[in-house]
Amino acid sequence: MPIKRHKRRLANGEERVYLYAVSKDGSQRRSLSSVPASSVSLPLYRKAEKNRIVAALQANSSLLVVGEAGIGKSILGEAVAEELQELGFMVAIAHPLTAKQSYLDIAQQLGVETETIEGKSLTSTQLSTGIAEWLKDNTAFVICDDAHRYTVQFRTWLAQLHEQGQSLLLLATFPPARDIFLRLPRIELKPLPDKPIRQIMRSTAQNLGIDMMPSQLSKLQQRCGGNPMLAQRVVREEYLGLDATNPDHTQWIDGTPFLIAGLMVLVITRFIGLGLNSTSLYLIGGILTVAVGVIRLLVYAMPRKSGKLGR
Amino acid sequence: MMIVTHTALSIAGTALTMGTADPVVLGAAALAAQLPDMDTSKSLPGRILFPISRRLEKRFPHRSVTHSFIATGLIAFVALPLMFWKQVAWQAFVLGYFFGWFGDVFTKSGVCAFYPSSARLVIPGNPRMRLSTGSGAEVFVFAALFAVAIATININSNGGVLTAFNKVLGVPSGAVEIVGEEGSKYLMIAHIRGRNAITQQRIDASFEVIKPLTQNDLLVKDKQGIVYRVGVSQESQILASQIQVQRSSPISVQLQSIFLDSDDVYATVANLPPERTYITGTLTVEDSEDLQLRTTPQQFSTITLQPAQGYAIAHLVSASPQEVARQLGSYFATGSLIVRTINVRS
C-alpha cells in the first residue's frame, strides 16, 4: 500500500507529521506513525537518483554510489530502502562493524537464523554462508552504507554475493579503485544546487529556533559547496556563535597554475624586445622572467593543503 | 575583502594593464570593482543597490554568480553605452569589475568563477595561506596594493613603464627612444656618464639634447654651446655608459624651409634667432677654393665639406646660425636648408 505523509498543526501550536498507508482506491487507510514535525528528516532532493537506483536494483543490477562525505549518500540509501520496502521487498542495511557483527545485523534484518537449534550462536562463516544461501532462495536487497570502511573479509563476501547474482547497493566516500568497488556500475553524487542547500539551511535554522537573514545565509552558504551536511553544520556553528572555520567541501579549482601561466606569458616581452631590437624591452622581459620564476618558486614552496582538520 | 582592498587592486590592475593614469578611467574601474559585492545587502554597494542585492542574496550564495566570468561578460554587455562616451572607460569598467571579484580568489572561500559550476576558484590551494576579510594579512596586502597603485599611476603619468625603466637604467638606446617620443614636446636634458673618446677624461655632466642621431647616439650641447655626439658608436665624442634623460620645459618647434640660389649665406642666416636654431641641409658653396673649415676633433662637426673643382658641397647637421655664419658667411651658395627653431615656453 502506498504511504502518504501529512503535516498538521494542532490546537496547542505543535506541528506533527502523520504517516498513513493508503490503499490504491483510497478505501483503506492505516495510521503508521505520528511524530513531531521537527524530528522529520528533510525532503529528499535526489529523487532522480533514487528512482534510478530503485529501478536498477529491481532489474537485478548492483550499484556503487560515491561522493564526498556529507553529500547525502546515507539519506539516499535510506530513501531507497524505504521505497523498496514500500514496494514489498525485504531490505537489509549494513553498517561498518566487525565482519561478524555485520553478518549478525544483516541476518537479523532479513530474518535469517543466527543460532543453531541448540541455541548456540553461529560462527561468522556459518552466518555468512547462511545469509548467502537465504539470499539465493529469497528476493531481498542489501544496502551497504559507508562501504569504504568495510574490512577486506566483508568486502570479499560482498563480492561473492555479487557473483551469485545478488543485488547490492554500496554507498562509499571516495573508495579505493579495487575489488568490489571497481566491479560495480557507479553513480557519482554531484553537489546539490544552491536552492536546496538554502532550503536545508533555512530548515536547520528553523529547527534550532533561530531567525537568520538572507544575507547571513548567503554568507554561510559559500562555505557549503553544495554539501547538505555542511549546510546544516554551518548553521549550527552560527547558532553556537563559533568562528568560521576553513571550508571543508571538495568543490575547489586551484587557480595557482593558471596565475603562474598568465604571468609566464609576460616573458614574451623579452622576445618582443629582441625582435624590435629594443635593449630596454629585452631587459624588462629578462627582469619579468626572473620575477615570475621567483613567484613560482615561492608559491610552490608554500605548505600544501593538509588532509587533517584544524591547523 | 574590504572595499579599500578591492579598490586598490582594481586601480593597480587597471593602471598596469591599460597603462593609464586618467582619473576618469581609473575612477570607472574603482566604481566597477565594488559591483561584484552587490550580492549581499551587508556590503556598501549592496546597501546602495538594495533591490538587486536583496534578490541576489535570497537566491545565491555570497561570491557566486556575481563573481564569475559570465557576470563579467554580462557587465561588459550592459556597460556597452559607455563605449559611445569613452571606449577606454568601458574597458576600464569591465577590467575593474573583473579585478573586483578576482581579488576574492585569494580569500578562504574563493569565488564561483566558472558559474554555473559551483566549484570555487582559489589561489593558493591551501586555505591557511588565503586571506580572511579584515585580517591583519589583508591590511598588509592592501598597503602593498596601494603602493603599487600609486607607483603605477606615477609611472604612467610620466610616460609609461618603458620610459620609467629607461630613465632609471639610462641605457643609451633607451635614452634615444625617450627623446624620440618626447623630444618634440619638451626640452630634454641628458645627464651623461661616460668618457671623452679622445682625451679619455671622465664625464659626469648634464647636456641639452638637440636630437637623436642614430638608434644609439644623441646630439647634445653643453652650456657653452659646444655640440657633441654622445653614444656608443666610434664616431661619438663622448662614449656614454649611461644617459638619463629628463623632461625640462615644454617647447614649441618652428620649422622653416630656406632655398638659396647663389645667395649670400651670411645674409640668409643672420636674421635667424640665435638661440636653439638648428640648420640642416646641403649647400653647394661657390668659389670655395680658399674655404677651409675650422674644426676640432673634440666636438661634433655640424658642417662637413666635400671639396670639388671650383666649388664645394657643405653638409649641415643641426648647425647653429652662428656656426654657419662663421664658417660659410663670406660665400655664396645654392641649396635648400631646413631650419628648426625651438621656443621654450615658460
Image (spheres, rainbow, N blue to C red):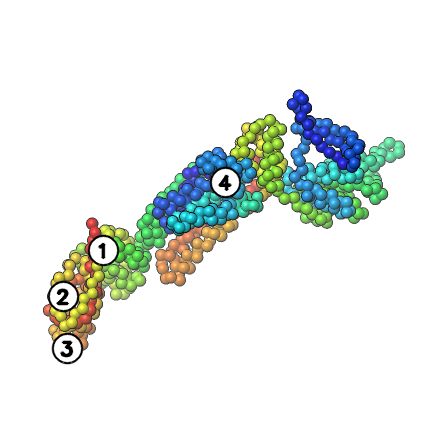
**Pointer 1 local density, CA inside 10 Å: few below 14, some 14–19, many at least 20:** some
At a point 71% along the width and 46% down the height, the residue shown is: A181
Q: Earlier in the sequence, mark 3 or mark 1?
A: 1
Q: Which residue is the site of mark 4?
A: B107
In the current view of this chain or complex, which residue is farthest to the bottom?
A: B309
Q: Nearer the viewer, residue A195 or B228?
A: A195
* Residue B252: mark: 1
Q: Which residue is the site of mark 3?
A: B310
Q: Earlier in the sequence, mark 1 or mark 2?
A: 1
The spot of residue B74 in percent (x, y) is 49, 47
- Residue B193: image quadrant is bottom left
Q: Is residue B321 left or right of residue A294?
A: left
**Pointer 4 local density, CA inside 10 Å: few below 14, some 14–19, many at least 20:** many
Q: Earlier in the sequence, mark 2 or mark 3?
A: 2
The spot of residue B39 in percent (x, y) is 50, 38
Q: Amino acid at mark 3?
A: Gly
Chain at tag 2: B
* Residue B268: mark: 2
